[in-house]
Amino acid sequence: MSRFLGQVGVRCEHPDMEENDKTKKKTRHKYTSEFKAQTVAHVRQHGGDLTRTAAELGVNYWTLRDWLEAAAQKENPAPASNPSELEAENRRLKAELERVTEQRDILKKSLGILSTT
């Protein structure tokens, strides 16, 4: 086989390979929400082996993983925070950042002192 196989303008001379294998358009599958829900339930009931389940059902591994993540987000939505909680968390994070920055600066200075001796 040619090392240039698949490049533009290079013909494939191998008899077992069609010339347009690389240029074929992939068809997009449409799955019903019922099928997705049943598939997610099946994965959860049978130990969650995504690779095996995807192969059994003829579904792409990454598609199945996305369905599981979407189902988990629907079941456990992120809690809505009120502004006062967000402000309190912001203050706490700023204080932690200031503390960690101070620790970093102290370590930098001590490293400088140790390296000069």
Image (spheres, helix red, strand yellow):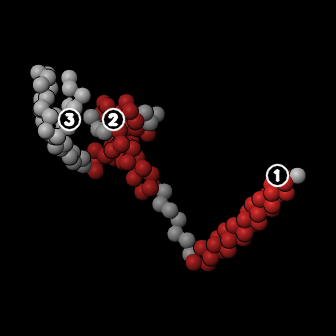
Left or right position of 91 against 117: left
Residue matched to label 1: 115
The kind of secondary structure element at disc 2 is helix
Image point (47%, 60%), residue name? 77
Reading the chain from its start, which is encountered first: label 3 or label 1?
Answer: 3
The kind of secondary structure element at disc 1 is helix
As drawn, 34 above or below 3: below
The kind of secondary structure element at disc 3 is loop
As drawn, 90 above or below 112: below
The 10 Å Cα crowd at callout 1, few under 14, some 14 to 19, many 20 or more, is: few
Is residue 85 visible from the viewing direction of this image? no
Is residue 77 visible from the viewing direction of this image? yes
Q: Are marks 2 and 3 in contact (CB under 8 Å)?
A: no
The tag on residue 6 is: 3
The tag on residue 54 is: 2
Horizontal and vertical percent position of residue 116: 84, 54
The kind of residue tagged 1 is Ser
The kind of residue tagged 3 is Gly
Left or right position of 16 against 59: left
The kind of residue tagged 2 is Ala
Pick the residue in front: 116 or 9.
116
Image point (38%, 38%), residue name? 42
- Foreground mark, 1 or 2, reads 1
Horizontal and vertical percent position of residue 30: 21, 48
Q: Are marks 1 and 2 in contact (CB under 8 Å)?
A: no
Horizontal and vertical percent position of residue 29: 21, 45
The tag on residue 25 is: none
For the residues labelled 3 and 1, the Cα–Cα distance comes to 57 Å
